[in-house]
Amino acid sequence: MMTPEQNFMRKIEAEEKIEPKDWMPEAYRQNLIRQISQHAHSEVIGMQPEGNWITRAPSLRRKAVLLSKVQDEGGHGLYLYSATETLGVKRADLIAAMQSGEAKYASIFNYPTQTWADIGAIGWLVDGAAIVNQISLQRTSYGPYSRAMIRICKEESFHQRQGYELMIALAHGSPAQKAMAQDALNRFYWPALMMFGPHDAESAHSAKSMTWKIKRETNDDLRQKFIDQTVPQIEFLGLVHPDQDLKWNAERGHYDSGEIDWKEFYNVINGNGHCNRQRVEHHIRAHEEGAWVRDAMTAYNAKQRAKTTE
Ligand code: ACO
């Protein structure tokens, strides 16, 4: 007769998904709550840097694309909050933890969007990095998270393509447009690499998350994939690679790259990036202004429930 813990590990090893009502170690549950909720916060906070350009998109087509992309990110946040709630936590508590700074969200969203080219760079590099990570997470061991990832990856792939298409238009456009594209690449390349988290040796949660198959590939392995896939994309754009130490390593079959500025990374994740304060303040304001919508929905649902039980 197996103990619940042995049965849990048997399922993990057999690639069976863990579902909300299954027994799971408390540390597995807590680690999932931490990761999935931070992922949800990232999707929602990620609406802000791009939302900043909706009113200034240069054509109706670009505006419609950006509007729908930002809306998708809000949707991703909702699936992920729902997936987190299956672990027995309340969404309101998760949001409060993000607003108080106790829970993190992706560092990348603390950088400002200064020019229209930044919208292209975000779609291409930020959503591109997110896809590399999320394709791997489609095979995560927790059922609701894995299923959310499958749908999210389909939408992210549209986001990545619209960003790259925007970069092509600029990089193959006038000299001023090309310079704008290069500047956006220079500013977003390194922060995009930071999205994969610290080096494996510094990553507090990786070992446990890999054993439990919450994570299927390590931070460094995923980052390497992204570095390798981005090189020909930069070449096609005709732009200069921001990493001057980048070199093909035939022995490894991968590019070797320069070191990330880890001081900057830790500064940003500890609340001291360019826009940390602004992002959280904006979230709090929007959340307070939207309280009446939540109240109205709760009242409506209560009335509907009362009608069906009458
Ligand atoms: N931004 C902010 N915080 C980060 C980042 C980052 N780029 N990378 C690591 N951290 C945090 C971790 O959340 C953790 O903090 P905590 O202990 O307070 O929770 C700490 O740094 C240590 O890092 P790790 O031990 O490596 O953490 P983890 O195993 O969770 O790996 C990773 C980090 C790779 C981001 C993982 O959580 C993950 O894959 N998350 C799901 C994907 C995701 O959240 N994507 C968000 C951006 S995509 C988008 O929104 C478009």
Image (cartoon, rainbow, N blue to C red):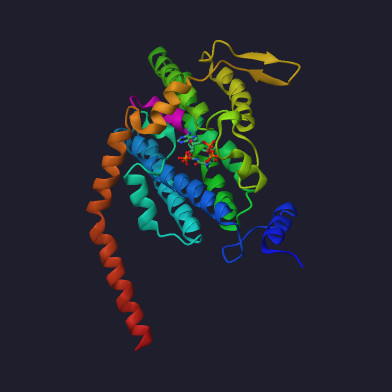
Residue 276 percent location from the top left of the image: 33, 34
Q: Is residue 96 visible?
A: yes
Which contiguous range is marked in magenta?
Answer: 113-123
Residue 212 percent location from the top left of the image: 65, 49
Q: Is residue 264 magenta?
A: no
Main secondary structure type of the part rendered in magenta? helix
Q: Quadrant of the N terminus?
A: bottom right
Asked if 105 appears above or below 249 in the picture, the reply is: below
Please give left or right for residue 9 compared with residue 171 in the image: right
Q: Quadrant of the C terminus?
A: bottom left
- Foreground residue, 40 or 149? 40
Total marks shown come to 0
| Most distant residue in the top direction | 244
- Foreground residue, 17 or 164? 17
- Foreground residue, 258 or 9? 9
Asked if 284 appears above or below 310 in the picture, the reply is: above
Residue at screen point 65% across, 42% down: 210
Residue 208 percent location from the top left of the image: 62, 44
Residue at screen point 66% across, 57% down: 17
Residue at screen point 43% across, 42% down: 42
| Most distant residue in the bottom direction | 310
Q: Is residue 114 magenta?
A: yes
Splitting the image into 4 quarters, where does residue 274 fall?
top left
Residue 46 percent location from the top left of the image: 40, 39
Residue at screen point 57% across, 28% down: 199
Q: Is residue 67 visible?
A: no
Asked if 233 appears above or below 242 in the picture, the reply is: below
